[in-house]
Image (cartoon, rainbow, N blue to C red):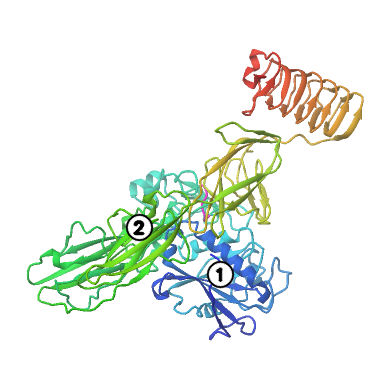
Amino acid sequence: MALLAAGLTVGAPAGAAPASSAAPATVVPIQVTGDPTQRFNLVLLGDGYTEADLPTFRSHVDRHLNTLWTIEPFKSYRSYFNVYAVEIVSPESGVDCDPDLSAPRRDTALGMGFWGGCNPASVQRLLTVDGVAANAYADLAVGTNPGNRQLIALANSGTYGGAGGSNATASGGNALSALISPHELGHSLGGLQDEYDYYGRGIPGDTYEGPEPDSAHHTVLTERQMRDTRAKWWRWLGEPSEAGGTIGRYEGGLYLRRGVWRPSRHSMMKSLGFYFDQVGRERMTERIAGRVAILAGGTATDQAVGADRLLWVDTLHPVSHALTVTWAVDGRTVPRTGNARHLDLRTLRLTPGRHTVTATVTDPTDFVRDPAVRGSAALTQTRTWTVDTGVRTPPEATPLAITGSTATDRPVGAQDVVYVRTSQPTDRAPRVRWSLDGRPVADTGSDRDVDLAALRLSRGAHRLTARVEDRATREVVTRTWTVDATGPDVDYSLSEPLLTVTRPGRPVEYVFNGPFTMGLTGTDDTAGRVTSEFRLDGDGWHNYYGWPTDARSPFLFTATGTDVDGLVYGNLGSGGLSVSPFAERSPGYGRHTIEYRGIDAVGNIGASRAFVATVLPPPPTCTSVVTGRHTGPLTVTTGVTCLRAASVQGPVTVAPGAALVAEGSSIAGSLTSSGASDVQLLRTEVRGAVALTGTTGGVTLVGARVSGALALTGSTSAPTVAGGEAGALSCSGGPAPVDLGAPLTVRGATAASCRAGAHPAA
């Protein structure tokens, strides 16, 4: 959400101990869902942002928050948070020791710095903050205090870094920085531990030799022991992990490689970009809910009430679902209350005397399976009254009003639960009727909220209205929301492939002879940032952040990944997309499916789409290169000869042990080889016949056009023959060719031994 609200400008905060003379600051409310004393308050502070840098700070805050609201459980419990940004005008731009110890120290209000505050014994990416100064500036957000808030200090830096603890930190401008925040909140708010199997990047951890860890998501137990003793994440074992793969037991964590196990191959606490798995998500749900009161108020309980009135409760309202309210009298559940926030005592016909009435509010979220967590004060709360049938309730004038609701200053998503809270007379319950685009919405059991997901809205904008009526006074009040039911679209752009294959009703397929890049761009029909995501071969959804070193650069996929600052990104091989550099992994050549989608600013998840990328091993390294026009025959006697945009005016012969790689070239005559180590024709035209015999390495023809016959004899491994065309095709003495889903077009005869790799011309 853009920073549009006006703020309160202040001078030096009382009690601050900043690194320089007190800097002026402005508190900007980003999202206010209730009284800060009844909400969990997220306060984002900027350090190293001068007056000229403040637009950059606002952009950093916007990106961090939009990313945070796409990640569960923050997405579902967004309404439990107030969010404030404190714009501190720094004397100097930047922070200390960025990016190395030889970098200068900066004069900033919060004294943020890398290397643990410029400590040579620390690690470069540890970004610290002056906690006293940070809390003094956070105190400017009135109503917040260390007991009801979480600080995130953003440094004006593009260097990767952050820290957890009571005060979380993150660099504001790094490509991965918006993912540092939820990871650090996993530490600061959830008490979760790192699942890294290293402490210093690139240095493998050793072996855990201690007792069963206190960490909720680390264990030394086997799966059977977890089930037998009902310990740790036994309730989730075997479930598809929200972070990809299956919830199970994966070795490594707590900065050690061996002897300790975690629930998922990768999750938010191991690899930035993935979601929390169910084990971490359950803990985060408990901790978020535990910072607020889900039973937020209602009819006073300090004295006995009469049986001639209504009792009321106020609850919080998650974005994704409604809390459950049940009523009981003298320990017996009142039936058919329809999850109502009120109970009409007059309908109960209570026997004379005193009775105990209890309202129980429970969060039914699927994110929690542990009954102890479900029954804790975080997710279950009660309110109790003494009802005395001898007490008479005096009449009172209660004006009809909507006293609270889902915010109307921005659209709501098509999967949201929208609510209203009304005035609470003692003698009647104002009735709420909902309409969508002018048509009544059917009663869903509780007239105080409506689950938009159940309405299966068509794409586009809709108008939702709550009409609150007091039948006694005939007063009517209304509240209206715009519903955004259109998911965002995401487009991709790829580096140039060797071959593109399109078939009706199938994802587009691309063939690359080596690494390739992917850029994702999200668009939406309404204002706000679109967060793009992708996943590889059905693994976990992964945030698209560009490339770790530059958010503007596309994501790079390679067979074994690319080492960036001691971590591996874009790995197509075993071990997953993001792995430790010392992890064993096999190259990921072959066919891969990449799905992509977007999440818009109101939480709508767009339809996922896919493309297929087949990655071939890269060509052998050239020992000689031919470009431009080559007159006459060409004989490759040794080494690897590469034709690059070359035009050979004659036949080409490849001698035993030699190799030819032709890309974007043409050969005016025939091509023959016997015992060659490797022959590759990539988008290359041969105006003659091609005869390849006894190739000891690989034969690769992708997008090649052969005017004459193509003969493949005695190849050691299966030739790759995809796309392109040939006058005829014969195969003998070796494996049949593979076509990567794009058969060769053959104008003449095709030998039976290689028909799987070709189809006749139309």
N-terminal label among 1 and 2: 1
Magenta stretch, residue numbers? 265-269
Instruction: Examine the rendering and report whether any part of residue 322 can be seen.
Output: no
Which amino acid lies under the numbered mark 2 shown in the image of this protein? Ser
**Which of 493/166 is in front?**
493
Q: Which quadrant of the figure has residue 687? A: top right
The location of residue 415, given as percent across then percent down, is 42, 53
Which residue is outermost to the left? 352
**Residue pictured at 77% horizontal, 27% vertical:** 679
Q: Which quadrant of the figure has residue 339? A: bottom left
At mark 1, the secondary structure is loop
**Residue pictured at 84% horizontal, 35% vertical:** 623
Q: Is residue 267 magenta?
A: yes
Q: Main secondary structure of the magenta part?
A: loop
**Which image quarter holds the C terminus?**
top right
Specify few, some or many for label 2: CA neighbours under 10 Å numbering under 14, 14-19, or 20 or more.
some
Q: Which residue is mark 1?
A: 3
Q: Which residue is mark 2?
A: 435
- Residue 326's mark? none
Instruction: Examine the rendering and report whether any part of residue 60 can be seen.
Output: yes
Which amino acid lies under the numbered mark 1 shown in the image of this protein? Leu
The location of residue 333, given as percent across then percent down, is 18, 59
Q: Identify whether 389 is placed above or below 376.
A: below
The location of residue 56, given as percent across then percent down, is 64, 68
Q: Identify whether 331 is placed above or below 389.
A: above
Which residue is outermost to the right? 631
